Amino acid sequence: SVRAVAQNRHAAVLMGVNVNFVSSVVFGISSALGVAAGALIGALLALAPGVGESFAVKGFAVLILGGLGSLPGAILGGLVLGVSESLAAGFLSSAYKDVISFLIMILVLLVMPQGLMGKK
């Protein structure tokens, strides 16, 4: 029913799905995952208002690199950016790891505008 609501709310209502309940449950699950991620990051880093910005930018880069709407693409994009950052920090200075990851994202988007596994 979650998929039905995500794809077409009106059709889900016509099929008897309680759209408000499904939306509320999905919102609750995503909020709980956000709280868990924040708690785990808070245990590792000092919390400040700007702490999540770097994670949000990296997540956006992974999403764009892998392709919008593709879960395997997001996983592949995360692996590509993670490995490229690790290699850049190992062979170059660690100051260049963000630059290398965004250069890879730009190069992939120039060659494949839909991302690595995005739909055309």
Image: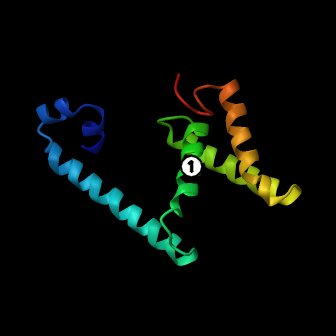
Residue at coordinates 66% horizontally, 50% vertically from top-left?
A: 79
Query: Left of 88 or right of it: where is 65?
Result: left
Q: Residue furthest bottom?
A: 43
Q: Which residue lies under the disc numbered 1?
A: 57
- Judge by depth and name the residue closer to the eye, 84 or 3: 84
Query: Left of 111 or right of it: where is 5?
Result: left
Q: Position of residue 84 (x, y in %)?
A: 75, 50
Task: Please name the colour scheme applied to the rendered image.
Answer: rainbow
Q: Residue furthest top?
A: 120
* Image vertical order of residue 11 relative to residue 40, above or below: above
* Image vertical order of residue 97 relative to residue 102, above or below: below
Residue at coordinates 67% horizontally, 38% vertically from top-left?
A: 105
- Judge by depth and name the residue closer to the eye, 120 or 61: 61
- Judge by depth and name the residue closer to the eye, 69 or 88: 88
Q: Residue furthest front?
A: 49
* Image vertical order of residue 105 relative to residue 96, above or below: above
Q: Position of residue 40 (x, y in %)?
A: 50, 72
Q: Residues within 10 Å of mark 1 (few under 14, many from 20)?
A: few
Displayed quadrant of residue 17: top left
Residue at coordinates 63% horizontally, 33% vertically from top-left?
A: 116
Q: Which quarter of the rendered picture does the N terminus lie within?
A: top left
Q: Amino acid at mark 1?
A: Val
